[in-house]
Amino acid sequence: MSTRQRGVFAISVAAEMVSMEIQNLRVYERRGLITPDRTPGGTRLYSPADIERLHRLRELLAEGLNLAGIARVLALEEEVRRLRAANARLKRAKT
């Protein structure tokens, strides 16, 4: 697991970093919009990648999207990243 993906921030720190309420982070997790790591005791730990995703989520909320819309946008953005990476691999394989 890369450093960017490793959970290091407690929920209170993560909420402060993205200017959100702790309860909102819990809702986003229940909705599958964010998946923080968990300690053996169940404490949520947010990674730098999770913090970036929460910032993006906040941007989309500010644009007026609801949580279902945000889920769709995030899924499509991930699909675009995956397809671009696959395309780059194919281009390298041809050369």
Image (cartoon, rainbow, N blue to C red):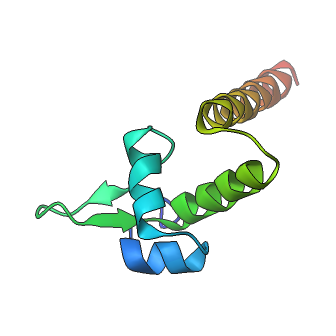
From the viewer's side, name the closer residue of 73 and 90: 73
In percent of the image, x 49 and y 69: which residue is there?
Answer: 21
Query: Hey, which quadrant is residue 79 in on the image?
Result: top right
Observer-nearest residue: 13 or 85?
13
Residue 35 placement, left or right of 40: right
Q: Residue at x 77, y 55 (%)?
A: 62
Q: Nearer the viewer, residue 50 or 82?
A: 50
Q: Quadrant of residue 90?
A: top right
Kindly tell me whether residue 12 is visible in this rendering: yes
In the image, is 36 to the left or to the right of 38? right
Dividing the image into 4 quarters, which one contains the C terminus?
top right
Name above or below for residue 68 compared with residue 16: above
When the figure is inspected, residue 21 is found, relative to residue 90, above or below; the finding is below
**Image quadrant where one finds the N terminus:** bottom left
Residue 10 can be seen, yes or no? no
Give x and y (percent) for residue 12. Answer: 40, 78
